[in-house]
Amino acid sequence: MLAALLGQSVPYHFSRFRSALLPLCFRDLAGAPNKTALFHALWEKGNNQAKCYALIGLYWVKDPDADRLAQQMILSHASVATMRGCIVGTHEQAASFVDMIKSGEYLKYYFPELAASR
C-alpha cells in the first residue's frame, strides 16, 4: 500500500503546501464546508503526492472533474514518492494506483469513516 500518500497523519509531502492551503490534514479538508474547492486547490498547487490526495477527495465528493484529472495524471506519467512499511523514498508511477483511488479502495482502507458517509 502507498502509506505515504494516505497515512493517519499528514505525510511529509503534504507539508510543503501548508502555506498555500492552510495547515489542514486530509480529514480537515474533507470536513470543511468548502471541501470541493480545497481539493481543487490541492490539485492545482500541490506536487504529485498532493494531487493523489486531491483525487481521493474529488472522487469522494463525486466531483465531475475527477475523471478528467485522473486521466491527466495518467497521461503525464507522474511519479510519486511512496512508502511501503518502513521503506521511504521509493517512487512509483501514479497510473499504477489511480484505479484504486477511483474505486474508493484507498478511502475505505485509510478513512473508513469518510467512505461510510459516501
Image (tube, rainbow, N blue to C red):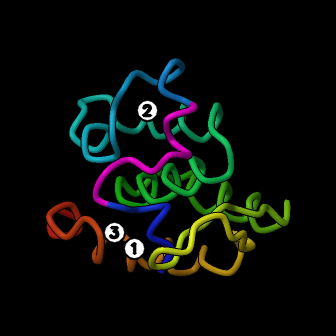
Q: Nearer the viewer, residue 70 or 95?
A: 95
Q: How far separated are the C-alphas under marks 2 and 3?
A: 17 Å
81 w.r.t. 63: above or below: below
- Residue type at mark 1 is Tyr
Say which of marks 2 and 1 sits in front.
Answer: 1
Distance of label 1 from label 3 (alpha carbons): 4 Å
Q: Quadrant of residue 38?
A: top left
The C terminus appears in which quarter of the rendering? bottom left
Q: Amino acid at mark 3?
A: Leu
108 above or below 51? Answer: below
x then y, percent, for residue 72: 76, 58
The boundaries of the magenta stretch are: 8-16
Residue assigned mark 2: 38
Check disc 3 and report its element: helix, strand or loop.
helix
34 vs 16, nearest the viewer: 16
From the image, tell me which residue sits under label 1.
106
- Residue name at image x 51 percent, y 49 percent: 54
Position of residue 21 measured from the top left corner of the image (x, y, whole percent): 47, 24
Residue under the image location 59 percent in, 67 percent down = 82
Closer to the chain start, of discs 2 and 1, is: 2
The relative height of residue 65 versus residue 91 in the rendered view (above or below) is: above
Residue for badge 3: 107
Q: Dot 1: few (<14), some (14–19), or many (≥20) neighbours within 10 Å?
A: many
Where disc 1 sits, the SS reads: helix
Check whether the beta carbons of the residues at disc 1 and disc 3 lie within 8 A of each other: yes
Q: Residue furthest right?
A: 76
What amino acid type should be assigned to the residue bearing mark 2? Leu
State which tag comes first along the sequence, 2 or 3: 2
Q: Position of residue 105 (x, y in %)?
A: 38, 80
State if disc 1 and disc 2 touch (CB < 8 Å): no
The answer to whether marks 2 and 3 mark residues whose Cβ atoms lie closer than 8 Å is no
Q: CA distance from mark 2 to mark 1?
A: 19 Å
